[in-house]
Image (cartoon, helix red, strand yellow):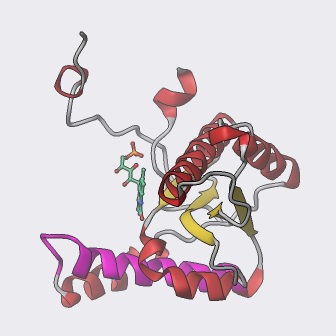
Amino acid sequence: MEVLRQRSSVRLFKETQIDESSRKLILEAAIRAPTAGGAEAWHFVVVESGEARIRLHKLLLEAHREYFTKLMKKAWSDEKFESWVAGSGSEYYLAPLYVAVFADLRERVYNDPRIEEIWAHQSCAAAIENMMLAACGLGIGSCWFGVPLLLEGELKRLLGVNDPELRLSAVVGLGYPKSEVRPRPRRKGLDAVMKII
Ligand SMILES: Cc1cc2nc3c(=O)[nH]c(=O)nc-3n(C[C@H](O)[C@H](O)[C@H](O)COP(=O)(O)O)c2cc1C
């Protein structure tokens, strides 16, 4: 509960690298997640150095542009997004470590592809949350990025992931937080989202 209460999405990171042992613990936490049918239908691409990391950050900014200016019902204007980027926006989402998480459907074990895909993505989601909580326990901040789904083809090319049966779930950004992490209160209390029968 301590870690659950401390975690909050971090979008501004220090440049400090995450050492190998912490990275290993975080990825180990990922594969400790529950996995539908024991299929372990997940695949992780770790990006931590050089050109790929910078290109991934650029793609994240572009994907957020799509999100803010097109996907949202109350969309931002292009000018608003540009002025946000020109301000502090361009520093957002630049993490020392990214983990791209794919639902791995290369080995089908069920007769219903729809259910298989949902379960693979749900297993990935559980792995993502495990990574984020493990990171939090190590003092490492994280953010779950769903927006790369808007540019999945580009992301796969960037990562050299060619197989159509590897489907993007999300990208997780990880790093030491630039400022104090303050958990965000929830808009909806438990009573609003739960019933007991
Ligand atoms: C499926 C999913 C997709 C998300 N995608 C993004 C994203 O693309 N960019 C981003 O900045 N945050 C993203 N988030 C983080 C949420 O915005 C964040 O969890 C939410 O605002 C609650 O804040 P908290 O995590 O600090 O409690 C995503 C979270 C989830 C679960």
Residue 154 within the segment the image draws in magenta: no
Splitting the image into four quadrants, where does ligand 1 fall? bottom left
Residue at position x 50%, y 32% from top?
6
Residue 64 within the segment the image draws in magenta: yes
Q: Which residues are magenta?
A: 52-76
Above or below, comparing residue 114 to residue 8 in the picture? below
Question: Which residue sits furthest left?
Answer: 74
Residue at position x 62%, y 82% from top?
156
Q: Quadrant of residue 147?
A: bottom left
Q: Main secondary structure of the magenta part?
A: helix
Quarter of the figure with the C terminus? top left
Q: Nearer the viewer, residue 120 or 18?
A: 120
Q: Nearer the viewer, residue 176 or 196?
A: 196
Q: Report whether residue 51 is seen.
A: yes
Q: Report whether residue 139 is seen.
A: no
Residue at position x 63%, y 79% from top?
164
Q: Quadrant of residue 174?
A: bottom right
In the image, taking residue 75 as reference, residue 50 lies left or right, namely right
Question: Which residue sits furthest front?
Answer: 111
Q: Nearer the viewer, residue 124 or 112?
A: 112
- Residue 80, given in percent of the width and then of the height, sits at 20, 83
Q: Nearer the viewer, residue 177 or 118?
A: 118
Above or below, comparing residue 52 to residue 131 in the picture? below
- Residue 145, given in percent of the width and then of the height, sits at 48, 63
- Residue 135, given in percent of the width and then of the height, sits at 66, 43
In the image, taking residue 36 as reference, residue 169 lies left or right, namely left
Question: Which residue sits furthest top?
Answer: 197
Q: Quadrant of residue 113?
A: bottom right
